[in-house]
Amino acid sequence: MSALLRVENLVKHFPIRRHLFGRQTAVVHAVDGLNFELDAGDTMALVGESGCGKSTVGRLVLRLLDATAGKVWFDGEDLMTLAPERMRARRRELQMIFQDPYSSLNPRMTVEQTLAEPLALHGLARGRERERAAELLNLVGLAPQYLQRYPHEFSGGQRQRIGIARALAVEPRLIVCDEPVSALDVSIQAQVVNLLQDLQRRLGLAYVFIAHDLAVVKHIATHVAVMYLGQIVEYADKRSLFAAPRHPYTQALLSAIPIAEPGLKREQILLQGDVPNPIDPPSGCRFRTRCPYARERCAQEVPELRAIEGHSVACHYWQEIMAPQGVVERVVVNERLVRLQSAFRGG
Amino acid sequence: MSAATPQAMMPNVNPASPARRALRRLLRRRGAMLGLVIVVFFVLLALFAPVIAPYDPIATSWSAVRKAPSMQYLFGTDEIGRDVLSRVVWGARASLLAGLVSVGISMALGVPIGLLAAYVGGWTDSLISRFTDSMLAVPFLILAIALAAFLGPSLSNAMIAIGVSATPIFIRLTRAQVLAVKVEDFVEAARAVGNPHWRIALRHILPNVLSPLIVQATLAIAAAIIAEASLSFLGLGQQPPAPSWGSMLNTAKNYVDNAPWMAVWPGLAIFLLVLSFNLLGDGLRDALDPKHM
């Protein structure tokens, strides 16, 4: 069976001009040769630091940005080569949920207008747009009385639900969730994540879930791709990735997750320095400048993403690198909760 | 802000629509209200000029040349015996018309061009922006005078000249606002649900850039009224004998020593009307401030 979404060698370079009349002098390597697949009903989490290109991937998958190279196969069609009109029709099947619920809703449109617009654009629910909009609100757990309200009358969590309802309006098959909970309060985060999971079960949705909070990822994802400087460094199903991270970058990321047990000590892998400039990425392995295990070969040869028993890793020496003890522990909901707990304990 | 009571009274209308809330804030501002009252007063004056004016504004009377204000001629008479009050009342028509029509021209040209420049970007934007910059390098009034002189003296040509001269301000303002709104997530969301570009520009971006444009339009009306008066003063606007405050001032300047009333009343009218539009514009700016939206 072929996957719902298959991304092949996806590349996105953003040209930058330094002078008023100057020619393009450099490019930002936002996404550099990405490959992955996603089946219906699955959730692939894209994780990585800010600036690693994960949001760009989300926008490329929906063709809100045009790729520099590569293909995005959706249900057997390469979205990147579709004519604009055909692409617009195809948007019915691909939707997006945004990070900032304060900027993702048009402040001049009522909830009803926001929800009815996609229906009208795709000729759905003709003549009963209002009922459908009410149904959608219901689906995301909001009362239909809110239809005539404007976005500023809602809280962040409620707005995010409206944003989810808008994405669901056209009955899509794939939704790109761009950090859908990171702008929300901790107490609301869980509600929204549960809502997304519940909707996935009921409607058979596939999610590309962009996140930096690994606790949320562990909760919702079926597969995880770890990105570093525009490339995937490790890709596996969730269980295998969290149980036995192979890439040193993944290990460092996982070791940064706080643990629920206050008394428990474990080693944290602290990375040195900052993410290198994506205008001029390091030669060979892009992670080598911060990798504690880097050797000479890492600067010369680009490590390929190789799959061993369904678990892919892009590292020359992953077999020699043991996962440090205690890296994989129970994941707590949030760092703030841990601080709160320790405050009580220290009392 | 408590929205509970009006909501209970008007169950079918949402009192929280952005426009409604702005109107409520505007009504609470004393300066803006004063401005609005004076503007409405002049609008009524212009509309009902034939009823209000005690005399024919162009009828001359050789027995009443340069008469000082009296019970018979409340504002006095001018150098050929026309009633100054009647001419000021009729002059409100020229001024208001010039203000509204020329700003209408500016917006009709400037808003679409600015929207296009910012939305399309790239090469189109550079071309439009450089053109706008070069127009803005010439002082507004000088440009208006040059255009009016080129088109030939008449009130409608003056309005066109003023409208075209004020267009770059609207291009630039619209462009800046659109650039700011364009990067908001809801614009990307509009694309993601499958809106065509024209709909994104008109339905999602334009309504969100209107507030500053309304403020600018109100202030531009004030500037246009002054510009019309200036052009008429120079003989490039309203043509005699039709009344206009600017041309009244022009003739009055020769008699300032012995018939100051000829200059005082039209001058006062210009001052009041321009002031009131500025007050209204300032009030609107506060009421439409996005921080309250």
Image (cartoon, coloured by chain):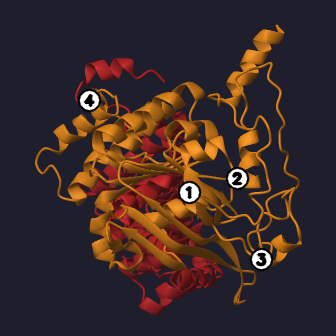
Chain colours: A orange, B red
- Callout in the foreground (1, 3): 1
How far is the residue under mark 3 from the one under mark 2? 18 Å
In contact (CB < 8 Å): disc 1 and disc 3: no
How far is the residue under mark 3 from the one under mark 4? 58 Å
Task: Say what secondary structure mark 3 lies in.
Answer: loop
Task: Say what secondary structure mark 4 lies in.
Answer: helix
Q: Which residue is mark 4?
A: A144
Residue B169 image offset from top left, x and y in percent = 55, 70
At 52% from the left edge and 34% from the top edge, which residue is drawn?
B29
Residue B286 image offset from top left, x and y in percent = 56, 42
The quarter of the rendered structure image containing the C terminus of chain A is: top right
Which circle's residue, 1 or 4, is located before the other in the chain? 4
Circles 1 and 3 on the same chain: yes
Disc 2 marks a residue whose amino acid type is Arg
Residue B194 in view in this figure: no
Disc 4 marks a residue whose amino acid type is Pro
Q: Which residue is mark 1?
A: A309
Question: Are there few (<14), some (14-19), or many (20+) residues within 10 Å of tag 2?
Answer: many
Which circle's residue, 2 or 1, is located before the other in the chain? 2
Give the chain of mark 1: A
Residue furthest out toward the top = A347
How far is the residue under mark 2 from the one under mark 4? 48 Å
Q: Which residue is mark 2?
A: A246
